[in-house]
Amino acid sequence: LLWNMCEAIIQSKITIAYCLSEFVKLLLNITLLSQITANFSVVHAFNGVTWFLSSLFVIYIFAPTIMKVLSKYADSTIKNIVCIFFCISTTIFLVFVFQKIEDKYPFFNYLRNTPYIRVFTVIIGMNITMLFSRLESKIRSSFINFNIAELFVTFFNIAWFFTRNSLELNRRYKILIDMVLCCSLVFIFAFDSGKISSFLKSEPLKKLGNISMYIFLIHYPLIVYFNDRTALSAINTAQICIVKSIIVIVASVAIAFLIDKCYGIRLSSSGQR
């Protein structure tokens, strides 16, 4: 706000209407800082389902700064790998600390949607990008079969997803496995050379990916609506829940496609927005 006001004064564009407009923008955007509190009531009071946008905003503040410090040391393949495991270790440590805080102060919600843990997962992604750029040519010229590699990491990620919650394993070990598997998935698919990658680039999936944020923002209000309609009803059975889930999925996708068609940003033939 101060920057825009100073710029307007220098350019002699300052008016009452301009000041009011900037003040309204400030009020609308200041809620994006709600994730800093990590208090569930505060976060969802302002943003509702868009808590994720607030989380991204906080991540964009901290992640580049931390990465800039780490990048001074991550000037080789080995150091990139060390940075990745440093961030994984930091994440596990934060989970341990935040769990202790939540056990003592239940009104905090650090573990579910805090940006403080996600900051380090973003930094891991940055380091994977640097690692990929250093190793891409060497790995492409090696004997690796990308079809097998993609199938391998996909199978283990899916298998772990469906079994992790049923395992009697310390939460910290689960997070370690989560992140190692996720890193391997991102790294292998970055080569974009297997049959699964080709499938994921199909036109229907690309269109679905383009509206994924719309789907995310729409699905939760629909869930709340249908839950309210059946909360006091005796017909809220497993079958009804399945039907509600199907309706929410179909309705979310349909509404998202409609919004994208009416208001979405179109891609030019060169792929530029």
Image (spheres, rainbow, N blue to C red):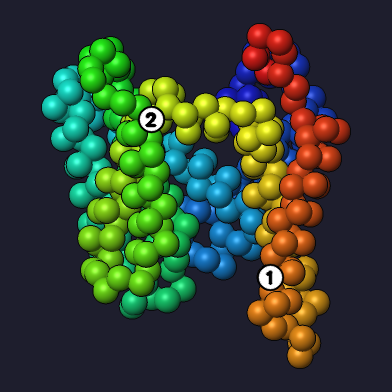
Instruction: Identify the residue at image location x=35%, y=64%.
Output: 164
Name the image quarter holding the N terminus. Answer: top right
**Which quadrant of the structure image shows residue 102?**
bottom left
Given residues 179 and 203, the one toward you in this image is: 203
Say which label, 1 or 2, has the lower sequence index. Answer: 2
Give the residue number, with chain letter if any, for mark 1: 242
**Which quadrant of the structure image shows residue 211?**
top right
Describe the element under mark 1 as helix, strand or loop.
Answer: helix
Answer above or below: position of 91 versus 150: below
Residue 258 place in picture, x, y as percent = 83, 40
Answer above or below: position of 63 versus 45: above
- What residue type is disc 1 on? Ile
The label on residue 253 is none
Q: Are marks 1 and 2 in contact (CB under 8 Å)?
A: no
Give the residue number, with chain letter if any, for mark 2: 147
* Cα separation between marks 1 and 2: 35 Å
Given residues 250 and 124, the one toward you in this image is: 250
Describe the element under mark 2 as helix, strand or loop.
Answer: helix
Name the image quarter holding the C terminus. Answer: top right
Instruction: Identify the residue at image location x=52%, y=27%.
Output: 198
Given residues 219 and 97, the one toward you in this image is: 219
Instruction: Identify the residue at image location x=52%, y=66%.
Output: 40
Instruction: Identify the residue at image location x=69%, y=74%.
Output: 241
Q: Is residue 233 left or right of residue 137?
A: right
Residue 176 place in picture, x, y as percent = 25, 53
- What residue type is disc 2 on? Asn
Residue 206 place in picture, x, y as percent = 63, 31
Badge 2 density bin: few <14, some 14–19, many ≥20, Cα 10 Å: few
**Which quadrant of the structure image shows residue 160?**
bottom left
Given residues 194 and 77, the one toward you in this image is: 194
Badge 1 density bin: few <14, some 14–19, many ≥20, Cα 10 Å: few
